[in-house]
Image (spheres, rainbow, N blue to C red):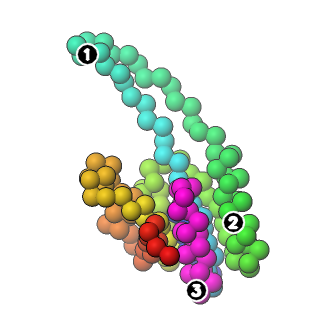
Amino acid sequence: MKTILAAIDLSPITGKVIEGAAQLATAMRAKILLLYVVEPAVAYVPVGAAMDVITAPMPVAPPDLTVAKAHLEKLATPLRANGLTVETCVKISIPSDEILEQIKSAGAELLVLGSHGHGALYNLFSGSVVTSILKDATVPVAVIPVHGK
């Protein structure tokens, strides 16, 4: 069975991404792998104004993924009720790296992502997962726009 990887971020566009993935899965007779990647917490070292005070970073506990897993299962339920095969996966990693890894490990034939529609200035400083993925993707990528019908 073919696999469509739908990478979601639980933002307001998640519903559109899942809807697009469901339409493609129905047409392709494919299963959907819903992937949510939690970015690791960043530990930083605060430095004093004179650059002479350096404190050790506070230990960062890994996030509890139970809520995210339950949320993905809730999103998968109506898809399954409509006859689609859906798997869910929650990982802690850098989103673009993990998405590319999941394409390989799941043997996905298609990746479905959402675009937040941020401007060039935002992408210059923060980057874009979609842009990063498009550079290195080994499968076709369907980008669901945030601004659309």
| Element marked by disc 1 | loop
Above or below, comparing residue 122 to residue 19 in the picture: above
Q: Within 10 angstroms of label 3, few (less than 14), some, or many (20 or more) residues?
A: few
Above or below, comparing residue 120 to residue 60 in the picture: below
Residue linked to disc 2: 76
Asked if residue 10 lies in the magenta stretch, the reply is yes
What amino acid is at disc 2?
A: Ala
Between residue 54 and residue 20, name the one nearer to us.
Answer: 20
Residue farthest toward the right in the current orientation of the protein: 81
Q: Is residue 137 left or right of residue 71?
A: left
Quadrant of residue 71 within the rendered picture = bottom right
Asked if residue 126 lies in the magenta stretch, the reply is no
The residue under the point 59% across, 69% down is: 18
Above or below, comparing residue 72 to residue 40 in the picture: below
Q: CA distance from mark 1 to mark 2?
A: 50 Å
Q: Which mark is residue 49?
A: 1
Q: Position of residue 76 (x, y in %)?
A: 69, 65
Q: Within 10 angstroms of label 1, few (less than 14), some, or many (20 or more) residues?
A: few
Q: Nearer the viewer, mark 2 or mark 3?
A: 2
Tags 3 and 1 in contact by the CB under 8 Å rule?
A: no
Task: Pick whichever of labels 3 and 1 is earlier in the sequence.
Answer: 3
Residue 116 visible in the shown view: yes
| Element marked by disc 3 | helix
Assign the N terminus to one quadrant of the image: bottom right
Q: Is residue 48 left or right of residue 130?
A: left
Q: Is residue 106 left or right of residue 122?
A: right
What amino acid is at disc 3?
A: Met
Q: CA distance from mark 2 to mark 3?
A: 18 Å
Task: Pick whichever of labels 1 and 2 is earlier in the sequence.
Answer: 1
Residue linked to disc 3: 28
Q: Position of residue 129 (x, y in %)?
A: 39, 58
